[in-house]
Amino acid sequence: MEATDDDKGEIYDVSTLNGRIIGTQYATFAQMDDWNAGVRWKRALDELIERGFVEDKNRGPDGPGSPFLVTEDGRWAADYLREVRPSRDARR
């Protein structure tokens, strides 16, 4: 849902020898110093792609690229979840 807060709807996945960084313009979910988080967030990104909520606009001969973009279905799903789930601020 974080990626839909950005007009571009971008999710970045950057892999280095030291680990992986997955995030959006406003939030970082996996950082290089936490290998386990990188694995979990990569799995989550792959599931979003599989379900059609995110797509890889930069797929090249070497495989997937970055950034990934939220699809129309992904934006719809995020909007729906915002309606049915109270925000963290509202629960406080």
Image (cartoon, rainbow, N blue to C red):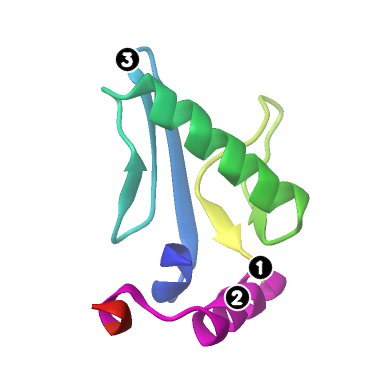
Q: Do the residues labelled 1 and 3 touch (CB within 8 Å)?
A: no
Residue 92 is situated, as x and y percent measured from the top left of the image, at 23, 78
- Give the side of residue 64 with respect to residue 92, left or right: right
Residue 46 or 86: which is nearer the viewer? 86
Farthest residue toward the front? 92
Image: magenta residue range: 72-89
Residue, disc 1: 71
Mark 3 Cα within 10 Å, few/some/many (few <14, many 20+)?
A: few
Magenta segment main secondary structure: helix
Residue, disc 2: 75
Q: Residue placed at 71% from the left, 28% from the top?
A: 61
Residue, disc 3: 18
Residue 46: image quadrant is top right
Q: What residue type is labelled 1?
A: Thr
User: Disc 1 to disc 3, how far (Cα)?
Assistant: 30 Å
Of helix, strand and loop, which one carries label 1? loop
Q: Residue placed at 42% from the left, 33% from the top?
A: 14
Q: What residue type is labelled 2?
A: Arg
Farthest residue toward the right? 51
